[in-house]
Image: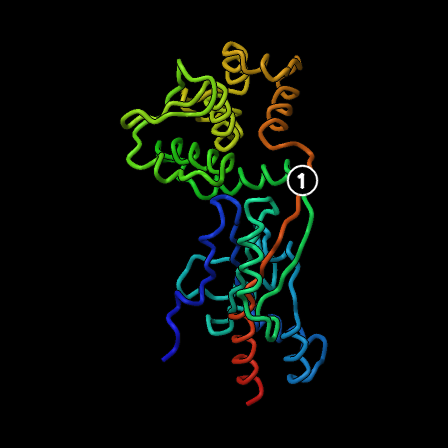
Amino acid sequence: MPPAKKSRELDLSAFPPGTVTEYSTLLCLACIFDLFTSQLGLAPRTAYSEIKRYAPSIEELTAPTAVRPFFDSEEKHPHCPYCNAAKRWHSRLDTFRIEGVKSTDTARRALAKSLPTKDNQFQFIETRSDRRSLFFDWLDTQRGNLDLENESWLIDATRSFLERLEPKHNWSEVFADLRSVRRSQRLEVGWERAGSRLFLAPSLYNEVLVVQYLISRSHTHAGHTFEGRITLAELIRRLRYSGYLGANEIDESDQFGILERLVEKLSGGSARTKLYYVVDRRNFLEKVKSVYSRYAT
Ligand SMILES: [Zn+2]
């Protein structure tokens, strides 16, 4: 009996929320075989062994818009947008990006140890980035995952932000059956849950507003926050009146300079950080093999 599909999925439950980003893309093997055999003139056998070794770059695997021979599709039975090949020619490549922060160290080592090394079923790639770029990636991920048409995204974004700030805290407990998030009149730091409401210390609440603004700001330069739809100038005015800018010594005069400092504060700025990618090549290797056997016969 073949193993249940679920058991093939990587167990990432040991990683704190928000530290792993998942990317998935489809690769058309008909396009690739065609490239190697027709255009490069390789015999199918040679093409097969070349393709098996093929290791796409991180850019190709994580690109927001896939380029040939990669494509993205939500359809159940998609066709290759380039050559129209049917599903049996497609392989899926899943890529997991793990942030190289202390809270992921143990889980990351355990994961690497648990994965099979045979035939390069998994590929490990290390790169470097900085906190600022990671923060913008994180905002993009939020924008993609949250349903901005539904008001409840404001609370979901708050949770994601708090998870990012304190990955080890049990946030599912804090957010269970939560109805609203308020600015606390009492707390100086942190948060407290009272009934169905979550109260945030003013500085934390202000940071949530900035994050909501950044996630939802559109070409009209307005963002959607707990305080309604506000422009950057209105957001900055609120932060100034509540003392947030002063407390963080943000004294730039123009609004884009202020926004830059806010981003620096929230992201951790230019501090370097490591990124660990794990590419799941199992489906790719299986598909290359089955596609080759079609070619060879
Ligand atoms: Zn194709």
Relative to 257, 14 lies left or right: left
Which residue is depicted at the point 39% across and 63% down? 76
User: Image quadrant of residue 113?
Assistant: bottom right
| Quadrant, the N terminus | bottom left
Q: Residue furthest top?
A: 241
Relative to 210, 49 lies left or right: right
Which residue is depicted at the point 40% across and 14% down? 186
| Category of crowding for the residue at label 1, using alpha-carbon neighbours closer than 10 angstroms: few (below 14), some (14–19), many (at least 20) | some
Relative to 180, 162 lies left or right: right
Secondary structure at badge 1 equals strand
262 or 114: nearer the viewer: 114
Coloring basis for residues: rainbow
Which residue is depicted at the point 59% across and 75% down? 118
The three-letter amino acid code for the residue at tag 1 is Asp
9 or 291: nearer the viewer: 9
75 or 112: nearer the viewer: 112
199 or 143: nearer the viewer: 199
- In the displayed structure, 105 sits above or below 240; it is below
Q: Residue furthest front?
A: 106
- In the displayed structure, 200 sits above or below 272; it is above
Query: What x and y, as percent, mark residue 232?
Result: 54, 20
- In the displayed structure, 59 sits above or below 201; it is below
Query: What x and y, as percent, mark residue 132?
Result: 64, 35
- In the displayed structure, 245 sits above or below 261; it is above
Query: What x and y, as percent, mark residue 58?
Result: 64, 56
Q: Which residue is mark 1?
A: 130
User: Image quadrant of residue 66?
Assistant: bottom right
